[in-house]
Amino acid sequence: MTGDCRAGASDVATLTVDVLQAESQPGFTDCLLDLVQSEQNANLQLPTVIYLKNRVNRAWERTDYYPNESLIPEDEKARFRERLLPILAGSQNLVRHQLVPILQRILHFDFPERWPSFMDYTLQLLNTNDPRSVLAGLQCLLAVCRAYRFKASDTESRAHFDKIIEASFPRLLAICGELVNQDSDEAGEMLHIALKSYKHATWLELSDYLQENSVNLGWCTVFLHTVSKAIPASAMQGDPLERERHHWWKAKKWAYFNLNRLYIRHGNMQAVLDGAVGGATRFIKEFTAQVAPEILKHYLQEIEKWVSKTIWLSRPCLSYTIVFLDECIRPKDMWAHMKPHLTNLVTHFIFPVLCLTEEDVEKFEDEPEEYLHRKLNFYEEVSAPDVSATNFLVTLTKTRRKQTFEILTFINQVVNQYEQAPQGNKNHIAKEGALRMIGTLAPVILGKKSPIASQVEYFLVRYVFPDFNSEQGFLRARACDTVEKFEQLDFKDQNNLLAIYRHILDCMADPKLPVRVTAALALQPLIRHDIIRTSMQTSIPTIMQQLLKLANEADIDALANVMEDFVEVFAAELTPFAVALSEQLRDTYLRIIRELLENSDKRDDMDNDFGDFLDDKSITALGVLQTIGTLILTLESTPDILLHIEGVLMPVIQITLENKLYDLFNEVFEIIDSCTFAAKQISPTMWKAFELVHTTFKSGAELYLEDMLPALDNFVQYGAPQLVENPQYVEALFSMVSDMFSDGKVGGVDRICACKLAEAMMLSLRGHIDNCVHGFVNIAMGVLANQGIIAKSYKVHLMEMVINAIYYNPILSLQILETQGWTNKFFSLWFGTMSSFTRVHDKQLCILAIVALLDIKPDQIPASVMVGWPRLLQGIKILFDTLPEAMSNREEALKDDFQFDSGTYGYDESEEEWDDDAANWTGAEEEEDQSGEAKDESTAYLEFLNEEKLKAGDMDDSEDELGEDSVLLESPLDKIDPYLSFRDSFKRLQEEQPQFAASLLSHLTQAEQTALLEVCHRADTQDMLGLQSPFPISRARNAIANGTS
């Protein structure tokens, strides 16, 4: 093996084959462990342990990812477990880092049942005086805590974990107490691992042992000492990111995190749902009284040092500090502790955190796209202090409403100082921060009954308008952003609105990319104003050109949303430019995808996980596809343009499907659906798209049939003539249906989609697909006749496959059923569950299938069901009885579908309403605290989740019901009036076969006969009076909602 490791590059292929063959040999993992343990050469030791890690990952247990891997034998696994911890304890850093994931993997499968000695050895390691052994013990304990972190409190495994905590955490606490007073890098690493173990151990539940007052105080003392500890010089080297990666800063981070988590999840009365046990309440009272004020005190001391610039704090430490302050706003006791410090906190801590850093300004100038991603997607940055500061201000002003005026007073001081300062002495950073601060408060300031909303227009004109022409690019960008934040403001002076529009247009031509992008985003909400929409109509083609250019300069997904809105609102103005627009959107999309694929190749080379694949570029590409889809929907009345655009978009469809970009499949299938649905015919280009869809399905995309279905339905309905002439296309469609039933990994929900595709084929290709119908009946009855319990909705769709076959050709279908001996079984099932056919579509189909059966001559009816033939009339009577109610339900469902929101860009005014006391802000500030605890939205959310969980138990049946909203596709049945169909068929039966008709009627009661005569009478009256039939049913698909998307 060692000889093989030293092989030259030319022997790599041979070496790979040899190693793969060796994997299946007994003792192979023993050999690898021997090498890891004895080899002194790191160049050989490290590749061996990496290979071992991959081998364990693939072959310790059978997984779906590696179904054909030769598994490690049980005897070797037992030896491996015995040897792993001693080897871990004796290994150097690089090797140890590879052994820890191996340990984690084995624990996941084998602990505690197959590895009962693990904790005994871990405790031995922890209790030695050898630093390397203690470090290995800490890593073992961390691995166990990770394995148990999501175990619920009521499970047996959690009880076992609580015993592990009680056995190991006293020693862990003692170790931490020693480490926090040391300064070596090794001590920092060990403390980091120890505090992370606590984090995982308390992630969901705090064990009874850890709730003991003395134990909890011991741990909180360690955390607070870590928070206050002066960081060793070795951890202060390099740039901020390098520092944050140092073990001492990670230890600090987890100390902050654990204190926050203890308070927010376990020690805060408002975070506990009703029904908390007495022990938890005792812990909360003790924590609130003894510990929480101490945490605040220590945090304030660290803030004071940071403000005075005597210490540096990492971003996570700053962020967790502000998160804790945020949590102190609502509870009355903690608010009382924090309130005296609030003015200083806001002005000297929160405000500087919100301001741009030197790094931000450099990025604005030198890396504008990176600056934009950071500032526009900052909510994705969990460790960003400015995110926490923003949340703090929102919580403060929503919960303690009168604090809004304190903050606004401070903002006014900053903007006035800026206005009055000489040109060379203006503090541009402070002005930018003040505007960011007031923009954050916009929803509160503009809330209902707000006493200050009327002042906003003046503020914008005086303090924001001048910044549109500032020499500082970041101030021009902030001016655009501030206007966007106050988009719900109703301007009194329309000239101010037009001035904003002109400023925004100027900024869209700014030399700085962030200014152009923020201007574009600010323009989007302005279109709610009539005067702006009117002004934009003449220049919208130019604006769209600018947006497309921007989209190619910066992959910002929000820009695609702006374009989509504009395409929707200015559809008429953009129609003459639709082809050019679609070409530019296509080119933008193709560029993004090529870059995405290049990035993916690089990631593959670096052996990274696939999890990052949906990055900013993917999201931007998604937005471009949605804009294309919206553009297509606006062109339904211009088929010539649409036909041209189909050709333009073919490369978009091709590159997405051929490269299996699954995250983008839904939007691509929607584009195909929109093209074919709007045109109501299938062009040669779209038939090429059909071939691509089929190839995609066959190459592993079966589970995307639901997304494909609307487009496939269009191919069947509007492409029926071509399908009849091209049997290979029909065969392709049939194979898609049959594959869904032969593939074991496909579930009932996906098979329902296959049933719908089969129905579309039988309804649109009547008389042309007899072979397929034979297959459809066999597929459906194969499940219905041989499987036990089937979900109700799945069962209905399977039965409707056979009912569709009967409607397609009743004689053929009866022959197929008879051949297999299924006829009686199917009819008993159908008529025995007639109440399950609840939707208008179901009832129409059943009525038309029964009508088709009534048209059969008596000598063609199988003897096995002849005796039950009168039940056809009883069944159709039940269907007609319940059809009016189903039609009423359908009307209601359609109404619900078209209740469009006028679009407020996610702004919910009700949340921001000022109560009368807060609106009367001249009242005494002291009165505010008498109201007790402030409303806690996070608790309300937890209660809501709890209620939903309780409701979930009653949802199993209702979720399987078929509502009218489950019929989303147009159907040829929509054009047929079942009343007229039955009347004509029944009259024909009475005229052509009077004795047979009389015989069938004789089995009905007088009431049933009268009901059927009423159906015929209704059809006659409808004809005689020329009344409009409720059929055909109109189903508008992909309708564009009013307002914004």
Image (tube, helix red, strand yellow):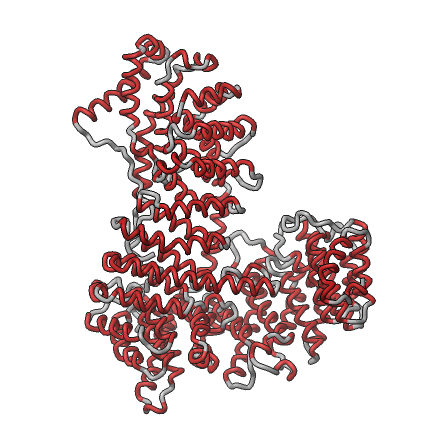
Q: Is residue 976 above or below residue 644?
A: above
Q: Nearer the viewer, residue 524 or 664?
A: 664
**Between 286 and 879, which is closer to the camera in this rendering?**
879
> How many numbered dots are placed on residues in this image?
0
Q: Is residue 301 above or below residue 914?
A: below
Q: Is residue 774 left or right of residue 113?
A: left
Q: Tell me which residue sits at (52%, 19%) in the image.
A: 821
Image spot of residue 197 (x, y percent)? 66, 64
Horizontal side, residue 187 vs residue 420: left or right: right
Q: Quadrant of residue 923?
A: bottom left
Residue 228: image quadrant is bottom right
Residue nearest the viewer, comparing 618 with 978: 618
For the point 40% across and 24% down, the residue is 809
Q: Is residue 874 above or below residue 515?
A: above
Q: Is residue 950 visible?
A: no
663 sits to left or right of 176: left
Residue 540 x/y as whole percent = 26, 65
Q: Position of residue 984 (x, y in %)?
A: 27, 20
Is residue 120 in view from this perspective? yes
Residue placed furthest toward the top:
995
- Considering the image in quadrants, where does the N terminus appear? bottom right
What residue occupies the far left of the structure in this picture?
1025
